[in-house]
Image (cartoon, rainbow, N blue to C red):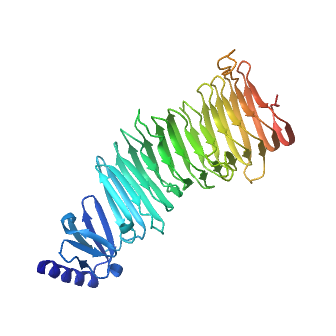
């Protein structure tokens, strides 16, 4: 006990005189304590633990305590660094007491305490060919993918079970690549349970080896300044989105999907706002619809295109470039040019089957379509294929098109 108190006394002098940051290392997890706010280091009565800034450290778990003379502390930041078969975590002291961090090799899991009331930012970087990041909680968060190269051999690469708003940031000049395991039970390579809001001008590459490449159970939003979203393979959908899609910008290169390029489905709560909607007001969508009976963009409700470019190669039998379950509105109102370009070469899927037969279409609407501005240009060569097929009413107000609905 006497040695411990002597150590704490000398350590306190060091903190008060020169140091800026205290680093407490417990295995692969390092907790940062700023000297200016560290306060007193309080030992437990039996001298088996230390408490500082609300963080309790068991002495037996402490590998080292380092005093750093440079200021590196960022409140609310969790830094996750992958290096081959291992990962190391640095946690800001202000949020560390409310985060349960588990690290096994390169598998990282974080559970936010229900009492957490401030946003945590997770910065993921480095590389691992068998790594994972998982997070759950009840408060919104930000996840920064900073040149992250992450593959997994048994499960998803990233799984965020937190059902709140999750900001996903791709810093400009960065490229992150994720791939999940084949033959797993995961829903997607990159899964977000809550509201996914993407920003940043970087690049994200995804490979979905079990099911979807990306999936969110609630809406997915892409900012006007968003960068590039690439999917080169998916055993099911390239992007599977719940509630609604709101795309304001970005470039989406979606190919190699055995399911739809983008599937937007209604949530189980039918009172959710804009449930099943697609809203595209900017960005460029390059869609390779090569699998039979699949769609480039499919949704369960109203479909809006008010700006942006959709380019689809529709070669699968019975495939559709766009398939809307409700009314469609294509116009020029967002300030971004509206352009839909398609090459439709697929033929009929399961011809003669009274239930499964499906003909190839550029645009298929199950209700009304209103066209009021923009450019629709299609080349249709597939047997019995059509450019536009509408079950309801076609209303032309303005715009340029070389195909008419039937």
Q: Nearer the viewer, residue 277 or 131?
A: 277
Name the quadrant of the C terminus. Answer: top right
Q: Residue furthest left?
A: 2
Image coords of residue 147 (percent x, y): 42, 51
Residue 149 position within the rendered picture, expressed as x and y whole percent measured from the top left: 40, 46
* Left or right of residue 109: residue 271: right
Q: Is residue 181 above or below residue 383?
A: below
Residues 147 and 180: in front is 180
User: Can residue 69 be seen in this snapshot?
Assistant: no
Residue beneath the point at 51% across and 49% down = 192
Residue at (23% x, 70% y) in the render: 65
Out of 152 and 138, give the one closest to the viewer: 138
x and y percentages locating residue 318 in the rendered image: 66, 24
Position of the N terminus, as image quadrant, is: bottom left
Residue 109 visible to an observer of this rendering: yes
Is residue 94 depicted above or below 162 in this figure?
below
Q: Name the quadrant containing residue 300.
A: top right
Measuring 60% from the left and 52% from the top, which residue is drawn there?
Answer: 222
Taking the spot 39% from the left edge, 66% from the top edge, the residue there is: 98
């Amino acid at each position: 006990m006497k040695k411990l108190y002597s150590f704490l006394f000398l350590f306190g002098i060091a903190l008060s005189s020169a140091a800026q940051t205290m680093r407490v290392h417990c295995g692969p997890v390092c907790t940062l304590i700023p000297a200016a706010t560290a306060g007193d280091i309080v030992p437990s009565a039996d001298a088996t633990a230390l408490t500082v800034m609300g963080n309790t450290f068991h002495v037996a778990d402490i590998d080292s305590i380092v005093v750093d003379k440079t200021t590196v502390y960022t409140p609310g930041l969790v830094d996750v660094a992958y290096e081959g078969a291992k990962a190391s975590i640095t946690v800001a002291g202000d949020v560390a007491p409310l985060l349960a961090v588990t690290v096994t090799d390169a598998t990282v899991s974080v559970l936010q305490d229900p009492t957490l009331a401030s946003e945590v930012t997770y910065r993921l970087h480095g590389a691992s060919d068998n790594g994972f990041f998982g997070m759950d909680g009840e408060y919104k968060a930000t996840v920064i993918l900073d040149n992250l190269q992450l593959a997994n051999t048994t499960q998803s690469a990233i799984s965020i079970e937190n059902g709140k708003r999750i900001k996903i940031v791709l810093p400009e000049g960065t490229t992150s690549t994720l791939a999940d395991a084949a033959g797993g039970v995961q829903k997607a390579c990159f899964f977000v349970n809550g509201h996914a809001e993407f920003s940043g001008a970087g690049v994200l590459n995804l490979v979905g080896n079990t099911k979807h490449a990306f999936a969110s159970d609630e809406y997915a939003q892409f900012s006007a300044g968003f960068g590039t979203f690439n999917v080169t393979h998916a055993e099911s959908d390239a992007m599977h989105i719940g509630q609604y899609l709101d795309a304001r910008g970005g470039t989406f290169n979606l190919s190699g999907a055995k399911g739809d390029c983008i599937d937007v489905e209604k949530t189980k709560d039918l009172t959710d706002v804009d449930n099943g909607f697609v809203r595209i007001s900017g960005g460029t969508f390059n869609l390779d619809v090569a699998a039979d009976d699949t769609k480039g963009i499919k949704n369960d409700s109203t479909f809006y295109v008010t700006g942006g470019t959709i380019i689809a190669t529709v070669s699968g039998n019975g495939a559709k470039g766009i398939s809307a379950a409700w009314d469609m509105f294509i116009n020029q109102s967002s300030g971004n040019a509206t352009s839909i370009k398609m090459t439709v070469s697929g033929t009929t899927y399961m011809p003669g089957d009274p239930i499964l037969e499906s003909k190839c279409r550029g645009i298929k609407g199950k209700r009304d379509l209103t066209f009021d501005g923009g450019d629709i240009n299609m080349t249709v060569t597939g047997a019995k294929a059509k450019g536009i097929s509408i079950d309801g009413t076609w209303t032309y107000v303005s715009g340029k098109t070389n195909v008419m609905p039937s």
